[in-house]
Image: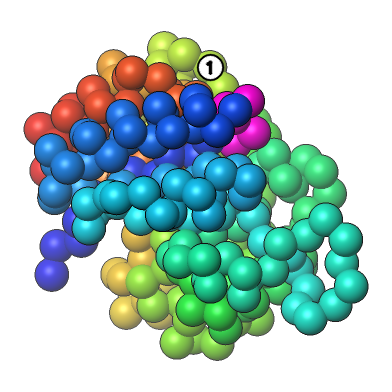
């Protein structure tokens, strides 16, 4: 069965007010309504998540968190549990984003968070990605290590259909001109699939969804979808702007 294209809007630590959050949400909602064959995931900061969830939205738009606590049922000041996220009606959670890894999250913590998400029936989106590319292919060994260490301790049943977001760190937060090329994305996606086949078998590898993130804008969305061999996109800064409807429109033209 063909997987539906997926676009995840990661708002990161934006915007500064609920008013603006509602505006950004309205733009996303209106465009999700127009493109029903695209699944649109919105990841606002926690302070807005529960409020936005109550607003009307089409069935192809769903909500996620940008993070969750790596512990359950403990005194853990400032953290938000998987149970809370699930109970307000969010469906997925981004785990292992490079900006969180930069704050000290390692593969072990990420593996723990993935397990907690699955146990709470939240769909995790596992982020992986190298800091830089090397001619010697060291970045490939790095990606392999991330995949192995994040996923190996999980029961196999959890891995079926998991979404992996490949976000090369060097291409995050720039303009589309500096994003990874679709050809390089394609090559890396094939590599990721091979690693998953080697580690967990073909059935799981075939079921995995791989999406790309890193300077996706309206200008490069279509060609990444067409030539990058990905199942969708993870969009940061452009998801906060009027570019977002055009990203959906351009994605819709392809595949
Ligand atoms: P940008 O789209 O701003 O490069 O961010 C990508 C990202 O980190 C999404 O999670």
Q: Position of residue 85 (x, y in %)?
A: 57, 65
Q: Nearer the viewer, residue 145 or 128?
A: 128
Q: Is residue 131 magenta?
A: no
Comparing 160 with 57, the one in front is 57
Specify whether residue 151 is in view.
Answer: no
Residue 92 image offset from top left, x and y in percent: 47, 62
Q: Position of residue 164 (x, y in %)?
A: 46, 57
Give, as a single range, the part of the protein colored magenta.
12-16
Q: Quadrant of the C terminus?
A: top left
For the N terminus, the image quarter is bottom left
Q: Which residue is mark 1?
A: 174
Residue located at (53% from left, 17% from top): 174
Figure colour scheme: rainbow
Crowding at mark 1 (Cα within 10 Å: few <14, some 14-19, many 20+): some
Q: 125 and 129: which one is in front?
A: 125
Does dot 1 land on a helix, a strand or a loop? loop
- Residue in the picture at 62% in, 75% down: 83
**Would residue 14 be counted in the magenta stretch?**
yes
Q: In this rendering, does residue 88 appear at all? A: yes
Left or right relative to 24: residue 152: right
Q: Residue drawn 84% across and 49% down?
A: 104
**In the image, the residue with mark 1 has its CB under 8 Å from the nearest atom of ligand 1:** yes
Q: Is residue 26 above or below residue 205?
A: above
- Tally the marks: 1
Q: Quadrant of residue 12?
A: top right
Determine whether, in the image, residue 226 is placed left or right of residue 172: left
Q: Residue at x 32, y 79 (%)?
A: 203
Residue 195: where, in percent of width, then height?
Answer: 48, 64
Of helix, strand and loop, which mostly describes the magenta segment?
loop
């Amino acid at each position: 069965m063909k997987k539906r294209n997926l676009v995840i809007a990661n708002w990161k630590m934006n915007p500064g007010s609920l008013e603006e959050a509602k505006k950004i949400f309205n733009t996303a909602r209106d465009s999700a309504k127009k493109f029903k064959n695209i699944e649109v995931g919105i990841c606002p900061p926690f302070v807005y998540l529960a409020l936005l969830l109550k607003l009307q939205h089409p069935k192809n738009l769903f909500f996620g968190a940008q993070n969750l606590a790596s512990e359950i049922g403990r005194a853990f000041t400032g953290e938000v549990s998987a149970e809370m996220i699930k109970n307000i009606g969010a469906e997925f959670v981004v785990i292992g984003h490079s900006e969180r890894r930069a704050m000290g999250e390692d593969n072990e913590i990420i593996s723990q968070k993935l397990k907690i998400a699955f146990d709470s029936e939240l769909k995790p989106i596992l982020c992986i990605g190298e800091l830089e590319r090397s001619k010697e292919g060291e970045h490939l060994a790095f990606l392999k290590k991330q995949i192995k260490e994040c996923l190996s301790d999980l029961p196999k049943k959890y891995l079926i259909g998991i979404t992996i977001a490949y976000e090369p760190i060097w291409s995050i937060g720039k303009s589309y001109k500096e994003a990874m090329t679709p050809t390089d994305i394609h090559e890396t996606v094939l590599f990721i699939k091979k690693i998953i086949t080697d580690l967990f078998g073909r059935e799981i590898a075939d079921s995995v969804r791989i999406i790309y993130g890193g300077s996706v804008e309206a200008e490069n969305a279509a060609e990444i979808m067409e030539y990058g061999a990905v199942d969708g996109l993870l969009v940061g800064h452009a998801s906060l702007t009027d570019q977002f409807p055009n990203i959906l429109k351009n994605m819709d033209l392809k595949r």
